[in-house]
Amino acid sequence: MKGLRVKIVAAKVVVTSPGRNFVTLKIETDEGVTGLGDATLNGRELAVASYLTDHVVPLLHGMDPHRIEDTWQSLYRGAYWRRGPVTMAAIAAVDVALWDIKAKVAGLPLYQLLGGKSRDRVRTYGHAHGNDLPHLFDSVRARLAQGYKSIRIQTGIPGLRKVYGVRSTLDQGNLPVVEDWDTGAYLRHVPGVFEAVRNEFGPELPLLHDVHHRLTPIQAARLGKDLEPYDLYWLEDCTPAENQDGLRLVRQHTTTPLALGEVFNTVFDYQTLVQQQLIDYVRSSVTHFGGVTALRKLFDFAAVHQIKSAIHGPEDISPVGMAAGIHLDLAIHNFGIQEYAGYTDLTNEVFPHAFTFSDGYLHPGETPGIGVELNEELAAAHPYTQAYLPVNRLHDGTVHDW
Ligand code: EZ4
Ligand code: CO
């Protein structure tokens, strides 16, 4: 069969900023088949670019791109220094590029190699936010008009300057924007917002909320309990869950479903959470978790404990990483929901893609591979721009989780 004896002859990293930074690995083979992988790590992009260019690309030359599992293991174990977002984003880029090549050689969209489809389309949720209720309601209506069937609600808090966890134009600048935080004000305000949203939009609309790691377990337990009357689809990243055991306390106090893990890099970060069923959704993305190979294993581990997938899908994961995730979403049985923030027109031009969004659902398309291309000329016209995520401080100046 053509393409079974291909060898990697070149690999390069492209960093482009069509509005925000994306890191893409392109692997080329001697028969002309190429593969793309996403290695974007928001705010630390060049560290991953260097990890790939300086340390991984020299290892790829002459390799058999079909040996995906072996390549994954050799990059993970061979580095000796394990885990971490930079390493795992770099491994993810190689892994996805190799899956892209294998699927192109097979002449099949990637989801077919992952077992074929388990559903016809992939349910998504979108983002609504507003500093006050009228703005929040307008934002929810705008998402509903786009077709979204499930909506994440983020709200301004009286006394705080800005809605957190939401992109602003200030994100792209020379130094991090400083935001402010008050846990007491937040805990007092949020339940009333959900009551108002329920009153306005009715009981059926699935609502989600992201806490962005800002609470302690006992605070999160209280919030989960206070939100029970409003029937959330989930409460996300309620604590900084490096302390996995902390979730037990949250769990003991509330039946609000819990989602967690967008910043995690390996299955070990989830070990207690999954084995003891302390959460309901795992939030890792292909890009930050070592690729399709590793994320598939996490989802299978989660399935044993009746936990579902909920791939992280902000606009800082490139369409390459997004596409790989959508193929997985279509294929696995324990799919939950896919976050989809959408992309600007310029980003879609830099990364033309086969996946489509309509009526609140995504589909990966039927193009062989992951179905994404890179317009290198346009990418080069929009070079890397230094940018940081915000930092967060309490009113007395103490740094808090953002
Ligand atoms: O703030 O990806 O659930 N989604 C999120 C994201 C994160 C960004 C950080 O780079 O929390 O929007
Ligand atoms: Co989140």
Image (spheres, grey):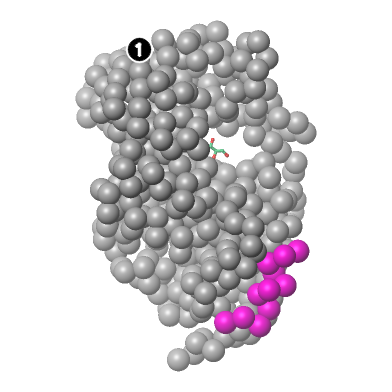
Residue at the extreme left: 203
Tell me if residue 60 is in the magenta stretch: yes
* Quarter location, residue 191: top left
- Is residue 357 rendered to the left or right of residue 78? left
Residue at 53 percent across and 21 percent down: it is 163
Q: Is residue 240 left or right of residue 310?
A: right
Looking at the figure, which quarter contains the N terminus? bottom left
Question: Considering depth in this image, is 135 or 91 the residue closer to the camera?
Answer: 91
Residue 392 at least partly seen? yes
Inspect the image, locate mark 1, and give the three-letter code of the amino acid beneath it: Gly
Q: Residue at x 58, y 66 (%)?
A: 77
Magenta stretch: dominant secondary structure: helix
Q: Does 34 appear in magenta?
A: no
State the image coordinates of residue 398 (x, y, percent, origin top left).
65, 17
Dot 1 falls on a residue whose secondary structure is: helix
Q: Is mark 1 within 8 Å of ligand 2?
A: no
Q: Is residue 350 above or below residue 97?
A: above
On screen, 80 above or below 270? Answer: below
**Image coords of residue 88 (percent x, y):** 58, 56
Q: Considering depth in this image, is 189 or 162 the residue closer to the camera?
A: 189
Report x, y in % for residue 315: 54, 43
What residue is disc 1 on? 192
Find the magenta span and give its range: 54-64
Query: Which residue is pictured at 53% across the width and 69% down the height?
Result: 73
Decide if residue 338 is in sight here.
Answer: no
Quarter of the figure with the C terminus: top right
